Amino acid sequence: MTLRITNREVDGVTVVTLDGRIVLGEESGALREHVKGLLGQGKKQIILNADKVTMIDSAGLGILVSMYSSAKAQGGSVRLCRLGTKFREVLQITKLLTIFDVYNTEAEAVRSFSN
């Protein structure tokens, strides 16, 4: 199953909706390139809506950390919302939940950029 990536603007924030798996190979590479392109376009406020992410592996986690670091280095921020139970557990076990700003809803994540 490929990772489908779509994005839209909500109140000046880029919301990237993910549908599928973030795993080693084409999927994680596509996500990395997509977010890299957004940052290159000057999009500094990015939310990853993970509501439809069915699986994430260590390569996917590595991509998330890489995106977080790249955005931060460019004065931006990548935030997560609508994590599934397993996705949240993986972030908690790996202690990455302490690094990312995670929100239950997309609206909360968008509002967080206003604060």
Image: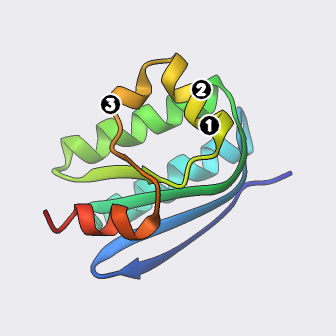
Residue 23 coordinates in the image, percent (x, y): 71, 36
* Amino acid of disc 2: Val
The disc at residue 16 is none
**Which residue is the site of mark 2?**
90
Residue 81 coordinates in the image, percent (x, y): 47, 54
* Amino acid of disc 1: Phe
Disc 2 from disc 1: Cα separation: 5 Å
Q: Quadrant of residue 39?
A: bottom left
Disc 1 from disc 3: Cα separation: 15 Å
**Which of these two is toward me, 88 or 3?**
88
Q: Is residue 72 above or below residue 58?
A: below
**Which residue is the site of mark 1?**
87
Residue that appears at 62% across and 44% down = 29
Report helix, strand or loop for mark 1. Answer: helix
Q: Is residue 86 above or below residue 77?
A: above
Residue that appears at 40% across and 42% down = 67
**Which of these two is toward me, 76 or 25?**
76
Residue 34 coordinates in the image, percent (x, y): 51, 58
Residue density around tag 1, few if under 14, some if 14–19, many if 20 or more, within 10 Å: some
**Which of these two is toward me, 50 or 5?**
50
**Which residue is the site of mark 3?**
99
